[in-house]
Amino acid sequence: MSLFHVSEEILQAQQDAGRASGSVELIAVSKVQPNDRVLAVLQQGHRVFGENRVQEAEGKWPEFQKTFPDAKVHLLGPLQSNKARAAMRLFDCLHTLDRPKLATALARLAQELGHCPALFIQVNTGLEPQKAGIAPDAVDTFVKDCRALDLPVMGLMCIPPVEEEASLHFALLAKLARRNGLEGLSMGMSDDFAKAISFGATHVRVGSAIFGARVQAPHP
Ligand SMILES: *Cc1c(COP(=O)(O)O)cnc(C)c1O
């Protein structure tokens, strides 16, 4: 595939779901990709990218942004509290608000810096022990707590278990978001972004379908 094909498929999925065109944001996941592939996608006019690690993004995006100042970068990987300050400087959006301690750290930094990136709360829809995220039955309380901290939570994010039908997880995430009055749904990757759009995804995170297979395995 390619940026062109993924964009076409997104348009089609939006249309099939009776959704307005432009209601889905494509995040091109550039983690671990060689710079020439990322540059090619920038040159094709795409401006929204996703990275998994603060350090990798720091080594890459400030340089690209000299040439493409309107490029936006979203953090999709877990965020350690001690990297929160750097993350708030680098990223336009954090998709992995996954625990109370991080919420408190972000709220404190937001006060200090006078701004905060848009936030998605990561939900562990499959209750997988190795995966980060808020348990589904704890989401309502966590959303309330984040709002009490004045954090700009725009939606929920999930990574469905590989072995399971993703639809069940997309539907659950959509239900949790609706019930909490949240508009944003960050869900859907290369293999299932069209399906995620049919369940209401507002942000799809697509890597290999745009850039090709990752050259080396991403760090966990
Ligand atoms: C790597 C990654 C993606 C993109 O995965 P692809 O299968 O290459 O599309 C999306 N979301 C997260 C959280 C990721 O870590």
Image (cartoon, helix red, strand yellow):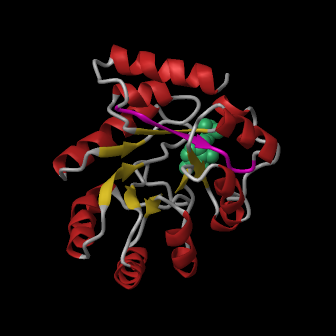
Please identify the quadrant where the N terminus is shown.
top right
Please identify the quadrant where the C terminus is shown.
bottom right
In percent of width and height, residue 123 lies at 39, 55
> Total marks drawn?
0
Q: Is residue 34 visible?
A: no
Quick one: 159 or 74, which is closer to the camera?
74
In percent of width and height, residue 143 lies at 25, 63
- Residue 109's place in the image compared with 60, above or below, is below
Residue pictured at 38% horizontal, 61% vertical: 134
Quick one: 166 or 101, which is closer to the camera?
101
Task: Report the span colored magenta.
Answer: 23-32
Where on the picture, by quarter, is residue 151? bottom left
Quick one: 176 or 135, which is closer to the camera?
176
- Residue 155's place in the image compared with 119, above or below, is above
Residue pictured at 55% horizontal, 54% vertical: 73
Where on the picture, by quarter, is residue 214? top right
* Ligand 1 - quadrant of the structure image: top right
- Residue 141's place in the image compared with 95, above or below, is below
Q: Is residue 160 visible?
A: yes
Residue pictured at 81% horizontal, 47% vertical: 216
Residue 24 lies in the magenta stretch: yes
Residue pictured at 67% horizontal, 66% vertical: 58
In percent of width and height, residue 5 lies at 60, 19
In percent of width and height, residue 107 lies at 35, 78
